[in-house]
Image: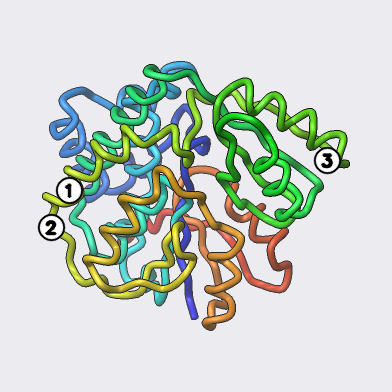
Amino acid sequence: MKAYIFPGQGAQFSGMGLDLYENSDEAQALFEKANNILGFNITDIMFEGTSEQLKETKVTQPAIFLHSVILAKTLGDTFKPEMVAGHSLGEFSALVANGALSFEDGLKLVSQRALAMQKACEAQPSTMAAVLGLADDVVEKICGMTDGVVVAANYNCPGQLVISGEIDAINSACEALKEEGAKRALVLPVGGAFHSPMMEPAREELAAAIESTTFNTPTCPIYQNVTASAVTNPEEIKKNLISQLTAPVKWTQTIQQMIADGGTTFTEVGPGKVLQGLMRKIDRTVDADGATLNIEA
């Protein structure tokens, strides 16, 4: 079965999407529509902006979403997924790709999500850290023993788990994890504690927007971050999407379940090759590549 997977925050780069804009009339029209929806020319920043400009909250998440979704739409007849998934933000891209969300509604929700997350970050300083070389259950145990808010946030691949929470708690957990034998426990340069209880204000704000948005029955199942299992019911999709901001991204479990359900070819749709790299660490036997623009589409 053919699976399409969509990257999350961190995959952005200067010049992203320019090849799509220059080589596809359909892509150009969608980028211009996005400029109008967002109220500013995000294309200027995507195509010519600096890395610092691309890190702006109101830019990063919509930019990755646009690159992923517009690339999917330009693939034409070659884009026929039998299952989809997205890493964190990428879940919104996946939901547009399988028809659960319209392009316009998906972009609006992503923009609202970015701004809500930024507000939550500013209200209470927090951070994340990457932990390498320890089993998941060991990391979970250390988090549970640490004072303050610190939780497992991103199960990226075996031996790579990101933790999230209060700054002091993250620092304490990192020291304990190193003592436990972690190869690395490195605080990340992020704006806040995503996929942790610290995002509760953002979850509440985004919940209202999601509840008022129309979700359709998708053309194929989406394997959502919260459950790591196939979902097709629109109401269940909405519920999981609302939970996503404060729940962990079960990416390892998601990919393993997709493979168990018959996934054999995984194509990353969006900027970068982060998910291809994780795929190789989750299961080397599976075919994983990146999507490229079909100019004739």
Label 1 neighbour load within 10 Å: few <14, some 14-19, many 20+ = some
Q: In the rendered structure, which amino acid carries the disc numbered 3? A: Ala
Q: Position of residue 91 (x, y in %)?
A: 38, 54
SS of the residue under disc 2: loop
Q: Where is residue 102 in the image (x, y as percent from the top left)?
A: 18, 55
Residue nearest the observer in this picture, 104 or 162:
162
Q: In this view, does 224 lie above or below 16?
A: below
Name the quadrant containing residue 189: top right
Q: Which residue is identified by label 1? A: 105
State the residue at coordinates (50%, 31%): 193
Q: How far is the residue under mark 2 from the one under mark 3?
A: 44 Å
Q: In the rendered structure, which amino acid carries the disc numbered 1? A: Asp
Q: In this view, does 146 lie above or below 6?
A: above
Colour convention:
rainbow
SS of the residue under disc 3: loop
Q: Is residue 2 above or below residue 127?
A: below
Q: How far is the residue under mark 2 from the one under mark 1?
A: 8 Å
